[in-house]
Image (tube, rainbow, N blue to C red):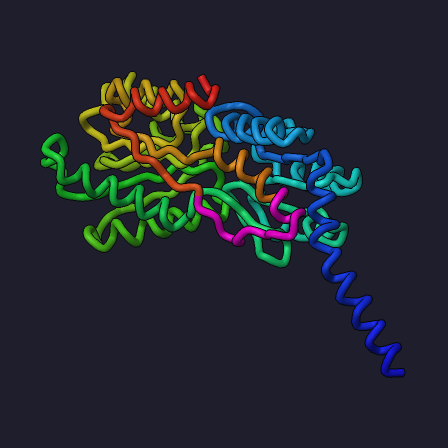
Amino acid sequence: MKKTLIALLAAGAMMLAACPAAMADEASEPQDLMFVSIVTGGVAWGSAQKGFEDALAELGWTGQYTSPTSPNDTAGVINLLDTAVTNKADGIITVILDSEQAADVLSKAREAGIPTVTCNTYTTPELQDCWIGTDPVNMGVTQAQTVLSYLEDEKYSSFDHVTACYIQTTLETETQNLQYKAFCDTIKEKYPDATLIQEECNSDAAVASDKLAALLKAYPDLNVVVSQDGYGCPGIANYVESEGLADKLIVIGIDDSEEILNYVSGGALDCTIAQDFYTMGYQSVYYIKDIKEGNPPAFDNDSGTIVIGPDGVEEHLALLEERGLL
C-alpha cells in the first residue's frame, strides 16, 4: 500500500508539472482570436483594431475584429460573443457596456475555457480574466483637474462659476458613469455650488452637436464642456468653432484622431485627453498569450491618459504616424 501511495503521489506531481508545459505548447501554436467590439473604425476603436492586428501579426496568429451593425448595440455584442463561444475561439477580446446583460455569455466562455479580456470596460473576475483600459476614476479626476487648471488661466479669469456638461457615449456605460462621478466629486471640492449635467450622444457627432446647442439654450451660463466620446467630440468642436464660442467655453475633448488634434490646434478644443486605444488592442492579445502560458496578468490594467494641448499636437501626430494610424 505504501509503495502504491508513493507511486500515485509521484504520478500526480508529474501531471501538475506537465500542465504549464502543455499550456505553453498550446500558446506557441497559431491561435485564432475574436475581438467583439461596439463599433468598427473611427478614432478609438479603429486604433484598437490596428493594435489588435499588429499583435496578431507579430505572433503569427489569426483573428477577426467585428462589431454590430449599429454602434453600441449591446444585444448585438452578446449575439456576436455567443457565436465566438459556439465556434470555440481560442481567445476573446470584447467591450462590455452592460455587465449584467453579458453575464450569461461570459459565463459560457469561462465554462468553455476561453480566455476573455475586455477593453476599456470590465465586469468581474468571475466573468473574465482581465481588462485593460483607461482607469475610470483616474480619467474623471484628470478631466476635472484639467478644467480647474483652465479656470486659473488668464484666458478664463472672468469665470467665477462652473456650469459644466459632460457628454458621454450612453448613460448606461458603467465605466463612463464612474468617470463622471469622479469628475463631479473633484469639481465640487473647489466649486461646491457647481451645476453639473450628464448627457449622451451614442457615438454620433451630429447628436453631440445638437445636445450642446440645446444645453446652451437651457443653461445660458454654461461655461464648461467635457466630451467623453471620440465619435461625438468632432461634432462638439465643430459647433464651438462655427458659433464662435472658443473664448466663451472651456472645451475638453477626448481621444486623438487627426481631426480632433486639428481642432486643438485651431482652438475649438482647449485640449484633448487621449486614451491609448492602440495599446488596449495590442496588449489584449499578449494578455491572452500570457493566460495560455499559465502567466495570467493582473485583473486591472490601466493604459493611461495623455493630455494634449496645442503645444503637444505635433509630437502626438508623430506617434500616431509611427503606429501607422495616419
Q: Where is 256 relative to 97, above or below?
A: above
Residue at 50% in and 42% down = 120
Q: Position of residue 40 (x, y in %)?
A: 58, 26
Q: Image height check: is 183 above or below 310?
A: below
How many marks the image carries: the answer is 0
Q: Position of residue 135 (x, y in %)?
A: 42, 47
In the image, is residue 194 above or below residue 272? below
Identify the residue at image location x=47%, y=42%: 133
* Residue 67 coordinates in the image, percent (x, y): 63, 30
Q: Is residue 216 visible?
A: no
Relative to 269, say whether 128 is above or below.
below
- The residue that appears at 50% across and 27% down in the rendered structure is 47
The region drawn magenta spans: 289-302
* Quarter assignment of residue 26: top right
Q: For this view, does 9 lie left or right of residue 201?
A: right
Q: What is the quadrant of the N terminus in the image?
A: bottom right
Query: In the image shown, does 192 or 175 lie closer to the viewer?
Result: 175
